[in-house]
Image (tube, rainbow, N blue to C red):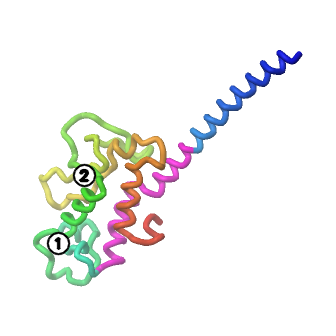
């Protein structure tokens, strides 16, 4: 009888451990879903706009034609626009500082799923893909972008690559409301 109880105990422990692992995996998947709801590319666009509006006196609140058309400029000096964009160099320098890789839309056919259940974008093994910033028209630079595989291939919200994105949001809108 003691031998049967020992076997039963062993089987129960294996089943219990398997169930605990499955629940941990499910929990992490749910945490990632919540993360992407809070830090989606759409939310990044919003953070860029809100950050410039909230801190209108800073140099990154550029009034060039591109920034005005992309709703990145919030001010009253629209009659005297900058000829050279002041926002893009600051934004790209911050991306480099944070270790966030970015590129223009690649020519390759490699694709990844982006913004869960929304669309598929070309991938270039980076954090952010500037979809229309291929140099043909300056108007679209950083107007439409998506996240690349370095962000979407992570499996845990504690991944350092995702923490870089969180830091970018904090820089854009430094407060508790950065991802409303």
Residue 86 is labelled as none
User: Which residue corresponds to the image point at 39% horizontal and 66% vertical from the top-left?
Assistant: 170
The foreground one among 95 and 66 is 95
Rendering quarter of residue 70: bottom left
User: Which residue corresponds to the image point at 48% horizontal and 70% vertical from the top-left?
Assistant: 176
Task: Give the extent of the magenta segment.
Answer: 28-56
Q: Position of residue 152 (x, y in %)?
A: 39, 43
The foreground one among 42 and 14 is 14
Helix, strand or loop under label 2: strand
Which residue is farthest right?
A: 1
Q: Position of residue 19 (x, y in %)?
A: 67, 33
Q: Is residue 148 above or below residue 142?
A: above
How packed mark 1 is, by other alpha carbons closer than 10 Å (few <14, some 14-19, many 20 or more), is many
Q: Which residue is mark 1?
A: 64
Q: Position of residue 102 (x, y in %)?
A: 25, 50
Magenta-span inclusion, residue 84? no
Q: Which residue is mark 2?
A: 130
Q: Is residue 119 left or right of residue 105?
A: right
Q: Is residue 29 left or right of residue 63?
A: right
Q: CA distance from mark 2 to mark 1?
A: 19 Å
The foreground one among 70 and 3 is 3
User: Which residue corresponds to the image point at 35% horizontal and 67% vertical from the top-left?
Assistant: 171
Rendering quarter of residue 67: bottom left
Q: Is residue 115 above or below residue 65?
A: above
How packed mark 2 is, by other alpha carbons closer than 10 Å (few <14, some 14-19, many 20 or more), is many
Which residue is farthest front?
A: 2
Which secondary structure dominates the residues rendered in magenta?
A: helix
Please identify the quadrant where the N terminus is shown: top right
Q: Is residue 180 above or below residue 55?
A: above
Q: Position of residue 96 (x, y in %)?
A: 24, 56
């Amino acid at each position: 009888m003691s031998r049967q109880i020992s076997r039963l105990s062993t089987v129960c422990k294996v089943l219990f451990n398997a169930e605990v692992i499955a629940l941990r995996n499910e929990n992490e998947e749910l945490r990632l879903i919540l993360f992407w709801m809070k830090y989606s590319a759409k939310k990044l666009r919003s953070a860029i706009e809100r950050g410039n509006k909230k801190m209108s006196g800073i140099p990154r609140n550029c009034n060039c034609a591109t920034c005005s058309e992309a709703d990145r400029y919030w001010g009253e000096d629209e009659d005297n626009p900058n000829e050279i964009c002041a926002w893009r160099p600051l934004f790209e320098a911050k991306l480099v500082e944070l270790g966030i890789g970015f590129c223009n839309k690649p020519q390759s056919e490699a694709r990844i799923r982006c913004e869960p259940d929304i669309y598929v974008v070309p991938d270039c093994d980076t954090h952010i893909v500037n979809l229309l910033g291929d140099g043909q028209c300056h108007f679209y630079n950083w107007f439409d972008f998506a996240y690349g595989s370095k962000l979407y291939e992570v499996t845990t919200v504690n991944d350092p690559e995702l923490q870089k994105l969180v830091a970018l949001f904090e820089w854009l809108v430094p407060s508790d409301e950065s991802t409303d």
